[in-house]
Amino acid sequence: MVKITRFEDLTIWKLSLKVTRLIYDLTSQNKFVKDFGLKNQMQRAIVSVSSNIVEGFEKNNNNEFIRYLKIAKGSIGEVRNQLYISRDINYINDKEFNYLNDLLLDLSNQIGKFISYLVVKRKDKQFLNK
């Protein structure tokens, strides 16, 4: 297994940046330009994903890291909801929606698996310390 020493080593962080760029590209065009509320909320929520991954990692504490990863997953859910709204009000088409929603679901699943790994690692460590 690859040793992770910096947040830049995290695959989930890299994917979160990719999705952030895509959301910013999307919300910088078409009908989003004049809808400051939805545009701003989507941008803030997607930035929250990578920010929480980094903040949790930098705490150097698995319990804190898990907590921040769960917050990141919540922000992904928020962005997915905003994508549904964007599609329903015809700001994006089905192709754009499906592509971004699939990426967000993949990211959420990867974060969920990483949380599970950290939980098991934490339990193993507690067992070994007894």
Image (spheres, rainbow, N blue to C red):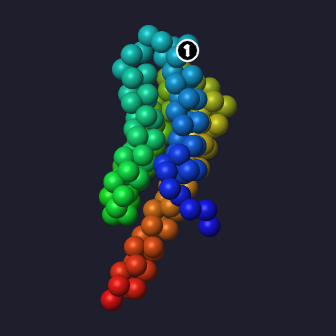
Number of other residues with Cα within 10 Å of mark 1, as a class: few under 14, some 14 to 19, many 20 or more: few
Q: Is residue 109 visible?
A: no
In the displayed structure, does residue 64 sit left or right of residue 25? left
Q: Position of residue 114 (x, y in %)?
A: 50, 61
Q: Is residue 86 above or below residue 124?
A: above
Q: Which residue is under mark 1?
A: 29
Residue 90: image quadrant is: top right
In the displayed structure, does residue 6 sit left or right of residue 126? right
Q: Is residue 11 above or below residue 130?
A: above
Q: Could you say which is closer to the camera, residue 11 or residue 45?
A: 11
User: Which secondary structure lies at badge 1?
Assistant: loop
Q: Residue at x 39, y 30 (%)?
A: 44
Q: Position of residue 88 (x, y in %)?
A: 51, 28
Q: Could you say which is closer to the camera, residue 33 or residue 121?
A: 121
Q: Is residue 129 above or below residue 84?
A: below
Q: Is residue 58 visible?
A: yes
Q: Number of labelled discs?
A: 1
Q: Residue at x 39, y 23 (%)?
A: 40
Find the residue positioned furthest to the top: 34
Find the residue positioned furthest to the right: 95
Q: Could you say which is closer to the camera, residue 48 or residue 1?
A: 1
In the displayed structure, does residue 48 sit left or right of residue 104? left
Find the residue positioned furthest to the bottom: 130
Q: Position of residue 119 (x, y in %)?
A: 42, 70
Q: Amino acid at mark 1?
A: Gln
Image quadrant occupied by the N terminus: bottom right
Q: Residue at x 33, y 89 (%)?
A: 130
Q: Residue at x 45, y 35 (%)?
A: 46
